[in-house]
Image (cartoon, helix red, strand yellow):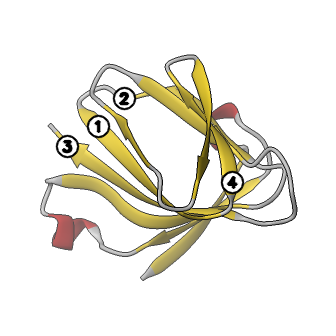
């Protein structure tokens, strides 16, 4: 498992931790990412669009604000989001003292 950190991800703010659970060989071109992602309080994964792939988030813990093509809603543990090819999304940990932790799966094609 590889762990990486991104500063101000996708134009957001703060530092995001990405724990890559599968490598490119294991994903065999079918997926672009399968990872556990952590956004600490105040951090934000900025709004971005997907082209040629789709992405799902499964929220494991914490409470965040999800931006689904401009429509914002609160997400919490147990929620699933879906961003199809050609759409965009973002996620922020807008308050509290708890990390927002989620599984991210990018599906190619």
Q: Which residue is mark 3?
A: 108
Disc number lying in front (4 or 1): 4
Report how far apart the C-alphas of labels 2 and 1 lie in the structure.
Answer: 6 Å
Q: CA distance from mark 1 to mark 3?
A: 7 Å
* Relative image position of residue 95 (x, y in whole percent): 85, 49
Please give the label number shown on residue 101: none
Residue nearest the viewer, comparing 106 with 56: 56
Observer-side mark, 1 or 3, equals 1
Quarter of the rendering containing residue 71 = top right
User: Where does the C terminus fall, quadrant-wise?
Assistant: top left
87 left or right, relative to 11:
left
Residue 63 is marked as: 4
Q: Name the residue rendered at 14%, 53% in the picture.
A: 30
Point out the tag, 1 or 3, that comes first from the N-terminus. Answer: 1
Q: Is residue 71 above or below residue 12?
A: above
Label 4 to label 3, Cα distance in Å? 28 Å
Residue 17 percent across, percent down from the top left: 63, 65
| Location of residue 25 in the rendering, given as x and y in whole percent from the top left corner | 18, 71
Q: At x 25% / y 65%, what residue is drawn? A: 24
Residue position marked by numbered label 1 in the rendering: 54
Determine the residue positioned at 29% across, 37% down: 54
Mark 4 vs mark 3: give the one in front.
4
């Amino acid at each position: 498992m590889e762990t990486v950190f991104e500063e101000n991800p996708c134009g957001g703010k703060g530092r995001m931790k990405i724990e890559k659970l599968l490598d490119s060989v294991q994903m065999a071109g079918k997926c672009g990412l399968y990872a556990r992602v952590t956004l600490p309080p105040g951090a934000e994964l900025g709004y971005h669009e997907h082209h040629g792939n789709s992405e799902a988030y499964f929220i494991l813990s914490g409470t965040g604000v999800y931006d689904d093509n401009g429509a914002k809603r609160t997400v919490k543990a147990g929620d699933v989001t879906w961003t199809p090819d050609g759409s965009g999304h973002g996620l922020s940990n807008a308050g509290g003292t708890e990390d927002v932790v989620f599984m991210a799966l990018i599906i190619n094609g």
